[in-house]
Image (tube, rainbow, N blue to C red):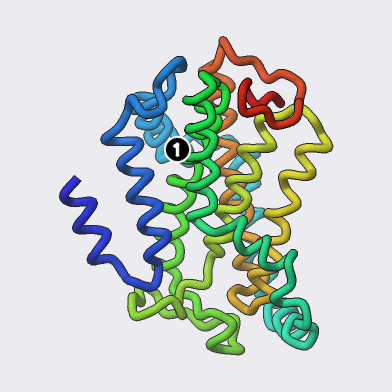
Amino acid sequence: MCYLLYLEFTLPTHYPNKFLLIIWLCIIFFFCPNFLQAQNNLGLRTGLEDIETLVKSPTKWNLKQGLTFLSISGLTYAAMYFDDDIQKFALENNAYANSIPMQFGRIWGEPWFTGTVGLGLYLQGLAAENSANKNLAFEIGESAFFTGILTLVIKYSFGRTRPRVTNDQFSFLPFSFKNDDYVSFSSGHTALAFALSTVLAKNTNNTFLKMIFYLPASLTAVSRIYQNHHWLSDVIFGGVLGYTVASFITNRHTEKKEFPENPKPSFQLLNFAYPIKY
């Protein structure tokens, strides 16, 4: 615990909300295993097993998975050659940069928003004895945790310059901790947005709802380019990262049948007296 508190005050100050979210999630996963364990088998054991499996997963990829990774990497690199043109187009047509859809997209990708959604679902599940929502909250928190850690490692390893600082999409300054001008790749907002949307979408069998859940994440990706915070390739890789991590978490729990007492029912409207049903 003391180490986590020290970490909070010594890490770069230009990402305080992201680090606060990660610290909060660390406390949940590693210091409060019973927080999410009531009436389900999720908790410290599941979290640690998921970490181990995620870390080892690249060593167990089959040919299809390896080719998928290479394709995504190739697509991201190819998109870099269009980054400058997309940025110029966005700047020339930015009359709606601060419009409600763009601001909504930005908020959907904020770390505090993901934390609030997860905490809200857990508290509702606790109050209504709704284990399905507590499971959902765990998946949101776990996906955000993994996505956030991976995003930070990628950001500081590549040190890509943001478009608001340079017109050169191939400008990189790895391991620069001065400010957030050199953490453009990949987009953290987009990654978190797609992680949140993917967890929600994976917890419903309703195709229309799946589309609705991905709409705000798509707005997040557009807003990051439109508001000149990221290049096109940043949001492409960020979106894929968030989707992949969240899919890994939800698929793993489904395959392990973590929720045998909570099969996914058909969706009904939000009900704070009974479980939220999908």
Quadrant that contains the N terminus = top left
Identity of the residue drawn at 57% across and 85% down = 164
Q: Amino acid at mark 1?
A: Leu
Disc 1 crowd, CA 10 A, few/some/many (<14, 14-19, 20+): some
Q: Quadrant of residue 153?
A: bottom left
**Figure check: 135 above or below 4:** above
Residue 77, compared with residue 19, is above or below; it is below
Q: Identify which residue, 207 or 78, lies in the foreground.
A: 207
View extreme (left): residue: 2
Observer-nearest residue: 107 or 241?
107
* Left or right: 135, with 7 as reference point: right
Q: Is residue 18 left or right of residue 235?
A: left
Whole-percent x, y for residue 34 in the image: 33, 25
Q: Position of residue 183 (x, y in %)?
A: 46, 72
- Can residue 38 be seen here? The reply is yes
Q: Residue at x 59, y 82 (%)?
A: 163
The residue drawn where x is 57% and y is 49% is 242
Q: Which quadrant holds the C terminus?
A: top right
**In the image: residue 3, left or right of residue 260:** left
Residue 78 seen in render: no
Which residue appears farthest toward the right when viewing the image?
208
Q: Is residue 48 above or below residue 10?
A: above
Among the 4 quarters of the image, the one containing residue 62? top right
Element type at mark 1: helix
* Residue for point 59% across, 75% down: 229
Q: Position of residue 40 (x, y in %)?
A: 46, 17
Tally the marks.
1
The residue beneath circle 1 is 54
Looking at this view, name the residue that lies furthest to the front.
Answer: 273
Position of residue 83 measured from the top left corner of the image (x, y, whole percent): 68, 77
